[in-house]
Image: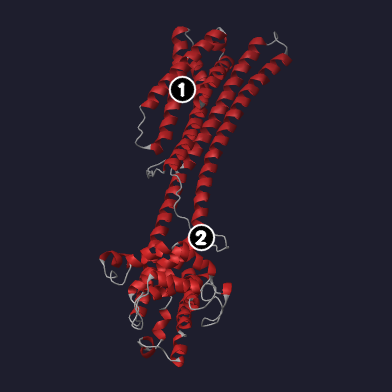
Amino acid sequence: MRITLHYLIMGIIIPLYAIRVCPFVEKLNEIDVFITILSLLGLAFLARTFLLRRQDQSKPLGLSNQLFLIEFGVLLAAGCLFGIYNTIIHEFPLVSGVKVLVGFIAMGLFAAMDSALALERDIAAKVKEEGLVLTIDDNFTPLTAKLVVGASAFVILNVSIFLLLLAKDLDWIIEVAGKTPLESAKTSIIKEFLFVLVISLLETINLIFSFSRNIKLFLHNENDVLAKVAEGVYESRVPVSTQNEFGVMASKTNEMIQQIINRNSELNKTREVTILTLASLAETRDNETGAHILRTQRYVKALAVHLQQHNQHGYRLTDEIIDLLYKSAPLHDIGKVGIPDAILLKPGKLTNDEFEIMKQHPKIGADALKVAEDRLGGNSFLTIAGIISLTHHEKWDGNGYPNGLAGENIPLPGRLMAVADVYDALISKRVYKDAFSHEKSMSIIKQDKGKHFDPVIVDALVAIENEFIQIAGEFSDASYASPENMKARA
């Protein structure tokens, strides 16, 4: 529709321009001039439709350049045919055809550039909507060169048109000197100049507006993606839709995002290996099994997801926080590496003095993680790991350790870990006790609701207890060394 509108406008403007700029065309019947030019424009429109259907669609980024050449080429051919027609039929001199050809060239450039810019916007929308990945060809014409050539062409064409008008009007004034009042001649000349000036300004403004839309679209896409990257969202990509510097910028931005993803993946793997290494170190000195780590971290995640989905109590848990809880949970007992073997591995009940020493392991672990966090200059993963280590033995009624915190003064990660850790200790066999059934373990935890445990988290456990049963079965001590669980552990 856009190019059709251009052709309709040209069907009005070019005949009027031809009549005003060329004295030979001016002598013809105006209706004949309009019919001839409209017929040529109709042929040009059919030719461009045929050529567009034969475009190479395998390289979408080159379609706008192809469109420009086709649109400009058929209109240039139409202008040449008009000059040839007048030369053969009406025996006009060559200069007559050149004068009219300048008008075809000017209008052809306006129409071709506007169509190419519109196509670039369409390609950008399609690339974004369908998630297409297009590759930039290194051998492209720089946008600055296109602007210089285009601006120069418009200046030269406009100057040429005004010079042609001036030459015709001077000849006309000499011809009608003494026959037409000077004031009337001046008014007629001004009208002609204003006609060309208004058309040129309107077309130029349209091109400026069209080009600014393309720049605005690119900057919007670029800034939108960069804003998401700044927030830690790396799924979006800048549509690569132009074979110029903007396309290169979009392509390089997308490469940068992929490199960030790769680096983050590598860092996450390194972090997870570090977690498992530290957790495994604690395992070697404890009477608990490695499966305890796998189960408790999944219990914590299950409870957190339920609280996220049922946020009646204001426990704001984002996906990122839940992921950090899941990954840092294995470090809850890392402080046990600082407890003497005689106490840590004692099969019987601990004495009061021994238990006082055992009660130091939350702080030992938290202090060790704090040293690492201080060295790294702040780290959300280590922060949550330290909170879990320090507070997972605190009790809702304030009778826990090491700091005797109570209620919501106990950080949520510690309250979640407390339920997960105790539940797993109850259903697991230890050297000092047999494993309790799920039912008995749940009964004990319910009795301690509001005493040892946050009532809201106990309610969450009750709501998803079948999920706890499933986790306990899948990661039981007996199946801990199975290939599937070894893979999960890794």
Quadrant of the rendered image containing residue 399: bottom right
Say which of 299 and 239 sits in front.
299
Residue 378 showing in the rendered view:
no
| Pointer 1 residue | 75
| Pointer 2 residue | 308
Q: Please, what is the three-letter code of the amino acid marked with disc 2? A: Gln
Say which of 232 and 299 sits in front.
299
Q: From this view, report whether residue 208 is shown above or below residue 398.
A: above
- How many numbered callouts? 2
Q: From this view, report whether residue 302 is shown above or below residue 210.
A: below
Q: From this view, report whether residue 427 is shown above or below residue 168.
A: below
Q: Position of residue 290 (x, y in %)?
A: 33, 74
Q: Position of residue 123 (x, y in %)?
A: 44, 37
Say which of 7 and 89 sits in front.
7
x 55%, y 33%: residue: 207
Quadrant of the rendered image containing residue 333: bottom left
Q: Do the CB atoms of the residues marked 2 and 1 lie less than 8 Å apart? A: no
Q: Position of residue 322 (x, y in %)?
A: 47, 63
Label 1 residue SS: helix
- Circle 1 residues within 10 Å: few <14, some 14–19, many ≥20: many
> Which quarter of the rendered picture does the C terminus lie within?
bottom left
Give the image's coloring scheme: secondary structure
x 39%, y 69%: residue: 438
Which sits earlier in the primary sequence, circle 2 or circle 1?
Answer: 1
Q: CA distance from mark 2 to mark 1?
A: 64 Å
Residue 282 showing in the rendered view:
yes
- Circle 2 residues within 10 Å: few <14, some 14–19, many ≥20: some
Q: Please, what is the three-letter code of the amino acid marked with disc 1? A: Leu
Mark carried by residue 470: none
Label 2 residue SS: helix
Say which of 426 and 365 sits in front.
426
- Looking at the rendered image, the disc whose residue lies closer to the viewer, 2 or 1, is 2
